[in-house]
């Protein structure tokens, strides 16, 4: 009789996992100047997401600025929804591996919230720039640092084929791939950012990888 | 009951979970379900290595940090955060913010980056490869490297091992054109003739 209660408590404990950014978020709420720590922590992730989406160095900088300004302004209204998000993480952990379990432990609802802002900002950018031709991804990455030897090498060599394959993916699959591989988000985090179910994100990623595999195979042959 | 598509997607997810944590375990790859499509596995490995995270230029980072500091000060003063008059440098932002305030209030406005420096949790950043935007970092690294090579070229080692190595090197037959080519390259980089 006591066993179901215990398992419920264990599950409840998993649901109550804390956001790993809780300390920083609380500090920033008390003193907005402390937001700088969150900004430094997530700058590269947000900027990369914007650059891979917009494929323009300057547009990515503008979008990144808007994202962090909106986040700073919205911080007093931010709510750590441990219940919803950690429940999703917890259910993922129920199904699967130690890595998924770790992803659930590392989950940050602040990061999800920040990337939801980024997704909205980028959607607005896409609406405004629909008539503007989009540059190839390797060109966009080359523009950001023309004298950077490492980047130039990456752009020239192995990168371009994979980037082109990713750039050809439909929007939702491409976003899922970027969030998974570049920003290293778990399936549950991506689901929360994109507003999809975890199962849908799993299928998106699987199909995206199959498309990329077919693309790379086609190039080789 | 999972369908074939959902089962394949689940296999792919488990493989990706392992693959994306190989840095933590210092491994190159992870064991995969034998039913996982080899093409999917190769594509995942390729994306893992090619889709790098990109850092914006330090100049942009500091400029935005300054603007956020202005926004934070506005927020503290009960004003809305907005993309308004943006000082070009962090110091200009602080001067702008402290203008007209009393000493106590002015002292509460931190320079951008101070909160970051105090925050120990940022030391645990991801070990992912990172590209840096902007030309400053690359050109500075090249300049430092060139100066070091020139310094080593012109300063002989005082240690017995160094002298022995130099003597051994000097006794070898070297192609004169090769040496002059190296010297020309160095002179080209440094713009000086020693």
Image (tube, helix red, strand yellow):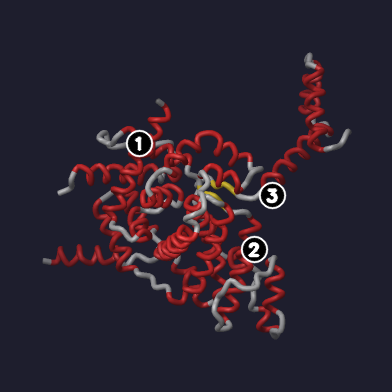
Q: Residue furthest left?
A: A1
Relative image position of residue A133 (x, y in whole percent): 51, 49
Quote the CA–CA distance across marks 3 and 2. 15 Å
Q: Residue at x 66, y 57 (%)?
A: B59
Host chain of mark 1: B
Location of mark 1 (residue): B41
Q: Are marks 1 and 2 in contact (CB under 8 Å)?
A: no
Location of mark 2 (residue): B63
Q: Residue at x 68, y 73 (%)?
A: B94
Which mark sits nearer the N-terminus, 3 or 2?
2
Q: Residue at x 44, y 68 (%)?
A: A22
Quote the CA–CA distance across marks 1 and 2. 41 Å
Question: Which disc is residue B6 wearing?
Answer: none
* Figure quadrant of residue B46: top left
Question: Which disc is residue B136 wearing?
Answer: 3
Relative image position of residue A150 (x, y in whole percent): 60, 40
* Figure quadrant of residue B97: bottom right
């Amino acid at each position: 009789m006591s066993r179901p209660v215990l398992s419920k408590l264990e599950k409840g404990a998993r649901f109550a996992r804390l956001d790993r950014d809780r300390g920083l978020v609380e500090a920033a709420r008390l003193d907005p100047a402390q937001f700088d720590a969150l900004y430094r922590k997530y700058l590269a992730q947000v900027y990369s997401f914007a650059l891979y989406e917009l494929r323009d160095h300057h547009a990515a900088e503008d979008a990144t600025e808007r994202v962090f300004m909106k986040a700073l302004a919205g911080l007093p209204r931010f709510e750590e929804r441990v219940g919803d998000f950690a429940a999703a993480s917890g259910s993922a952990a129920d199904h699967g591996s130690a890595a998924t379990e770790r992803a659930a432990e590392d989950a940050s609802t602040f990061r999800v919230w920040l990337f939801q802002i980024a997704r909205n900002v980028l959607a607005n950018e896409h609406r405004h720039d629909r008539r503007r031709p989009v540059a190839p991804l390797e060109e966009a990455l080359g523009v950001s640092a023309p004298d950077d030897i490492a980047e130039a090498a990456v752009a020239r060599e192995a990168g371009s084929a994979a980037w082109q394959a990713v750039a050809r993916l439909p929007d939702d699959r491409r976003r899922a791939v970027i969030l998974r591989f570049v920003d290293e988000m778990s399936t549950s985090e991506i689901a929360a950012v994109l507003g999809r179910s975890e199962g849908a994100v799993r299928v998106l990623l699987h199909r995206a990888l199959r498309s990329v595999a077919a693309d790379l195979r086609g190039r080789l042959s | 009951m999972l369908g074939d598509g959902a089962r394949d997607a689940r296999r792919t997810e488990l493989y990706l979970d392992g693959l994306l944590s190989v840095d933590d375990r210092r491994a190159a790859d992870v064991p995969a379900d034998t039913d996982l499509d080899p093409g999917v596995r190769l594509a995942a490995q390729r994306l893992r290595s090619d889709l790098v995270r990109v850092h914006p230029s330090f100049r942009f980072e500091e400029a935005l940090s300054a603007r956020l500091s202005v926004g934070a000060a506005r927020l503290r003063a009960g004003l809305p955060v907005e993309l308004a008059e943006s000082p070009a440098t962090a110091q200009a932002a602080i001067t702008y913010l402290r203008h007209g305030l009393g000493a106590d209030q002015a002292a509460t406005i931190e320079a951008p980056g101070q909160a970051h420096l105090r925050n120990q949790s940022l030391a645990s950043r991801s070990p992912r490869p990172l590209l840096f935007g902007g030309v400053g970092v690359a050109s500075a690294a090249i300049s430092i490297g060139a100066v070091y090579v020139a310094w080593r070229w012109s300063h002989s080692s005082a240690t017995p091992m160094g002298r022995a190595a130099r003597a051994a090197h000097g006794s070898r037959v070297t192609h004169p054109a090769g040496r002059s080519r190296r010297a020309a390259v160095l002179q080209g980089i440094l713009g000086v003739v020693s």
